[in-house]
Amino acid sequence: MSADLDGINITQGRELLTVYRFNTKSAKHYFCSRCSVYTHHQRRSNPKQYGVNVACLKGMSPFDFQEVPVYDGTRHPADGFPPTRAGTLIYRPAE
């Protein structure tokens, strides 16, 4: 899920967040320093947005989405590559 930088409000645990910067160090990835859960990141492709882990949002679950597109993470649009869809995650409830 995406949100503008002013579009999310951290209601608890802000003091436990730690930031990590991978590879180009452009994006800021936030994790809980206590349990290591990824919460959100400031995007490299659009620094004015956060990518948000929906499992960290009150009242939402990753299982609320039947299909989630997955993009190739090795060829980044910021490096001049077009977004390349690698596949789709599909949720099917157990019978």
Image (cartoon, rainbow, N blue to C red):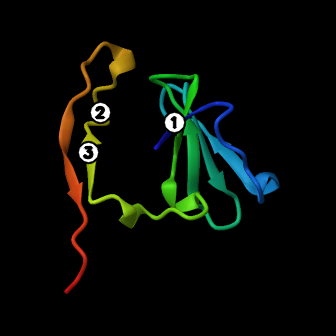
Amino acid, disc 1: Phe
Amino acid, disc 3: Pro
Mark 2 and mark 1: Cα distance apart in space: 12 Å
User: Where is residue 86 drawn, in percent x and y?
Assistant: 18, 41
Dot 1 lies on which element? Answer: loop
Q: Which of marks 3 and 2 is in front?
A: 3
Q: How crowded is mark 1: few (under 14 residues within 10 Å), some or many (20 or more)?
A: few
Compared with residue 27, is residue 46 higher up or lower down, i.e. above or below? above
User: Where is residue 50 drawn, in percent x and y?
Assistant: 56, 35
Tell me the number on the disc at residue 7.
Answer: none
Q: In this view, does 2 lie to the left or right of 70?
A: right
Amino acid, disc 2: Thr
State the residue position of label 3. 69
Q: Earlier in the sequence, mark 2 or mark 1?
A: 1
Dot 3 lies on which element? Answer: strand
* Disc 2 + disc 1, Cβ < 8 Å: no
Please name the residue shown 33% across and 58% down the image: 65
Please name the residue shown 27% across and 60% down the image: 66
Q: Earlier in the sequence, mark 1 or mark 3?
A: 1
State the residue position of label 1. 22
Dot 2 lies on which element? Answer: loop
User: Where is residue 34 drawn, in percent x and y?
Assistant: 70, 66
State the residue position of label 2. 74
